[in-house]
Amino acid sequence: MSCFARRAPSFKCLLAFLVLVAVLQGCSQQKSGKEAVDQYFKSNPDAKRANVAKFAGTVTIDGQPPEKGGDYRLFILLNDPQNLQKLPTRFTEVNEDGSFGFMTYLAGDGVPVGKYVVEFVQLHLPRQRQRQGGGVARNYVGPDKLNNLYNDPEKNKDNPEFMVDVADPGRTDYQFNLSVAGKDPIKTPGKFAATLVPGQ
């Protein structure tokens, strides 16, 4: 899923509400997901609703979809070019066939309109690690199978291919072909390079 990390309390409440709605919808189809989201914002007038547009498409690596099976997963991340973060708040996993689609409120609805730097990183889920205080750490970690070639927003923002301006109604035909074979690996990731992605 694409929504994570630093969010206003109202957005956290919305996420919790949507989870509850999803559970209840398993038992009853009286309200659609859209109706539930509309009702949330109607009931919480102080919550700011973002204007979202579709952002979906395909990613290939050397002309092929990500390898099937195995421990590695390919992620696409969207960073704010004016406020770069090591782990941007919007990211999603790329499917085995190379397709991806972001969501904010409902599946496939996209991301808030605006400009983004696109990043890619291919990480693996290590064997279960115990967190301090109990629980299991489920973060995807490096080394990046893309050799740190596409996970640095400072570098990517200089490449027009990785700068997107998402406007209403959005697009579902984005295509990113990442070339890895024959390129020298970047041994030391940049300051804002994505080297970890939280698991589900």
Image (cartoon, rainbow, N blue to C red):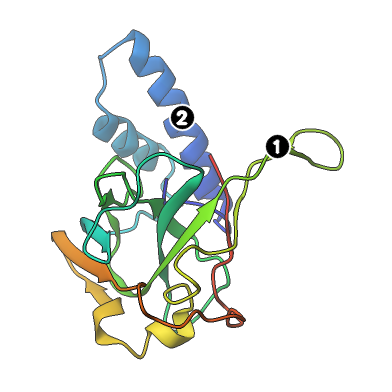
Amino acid type of the residue tagged 1 in the rendering: Gln
Q: Residue at x 40, y 16 (%)?
A: 24
Pick whichever, 26 or 31, lies toward us. 26
Report the residue marked by disc 2.
Answer: 19
Specify few, some or many for label 1: CA neighbours under 10 Å numbering under 14, 14-19, or 20 or more.
few
Q: Which mark is residue 128?
A: 1
Q: What kind of element bears circle 2?
A: helix
Q: Position of residue 37 (x, y in %)?
A: 33, 37
Q: Position of residue 74 (x, y in %)?
A: 41, 54
Most distant residue in the top direction: 27
Pick whichever, 68 or 32, lies toward us. 68
Most distant residue in the bottom direction: 158
The image shows residue 117, relative to residue 173, as above or below, that is: below
Q: CA distance from mark 1 to mark 2?
A: 25 Å
Left or right, 55 with reference to 197: left
Q: Residue at x 42, y 56 (%)?
A: 75
Q: Nearer the viewer, mark 1 or mark 2?
A: 1
Can residue 149 be seen at all in this image of the molecule?
A: yes
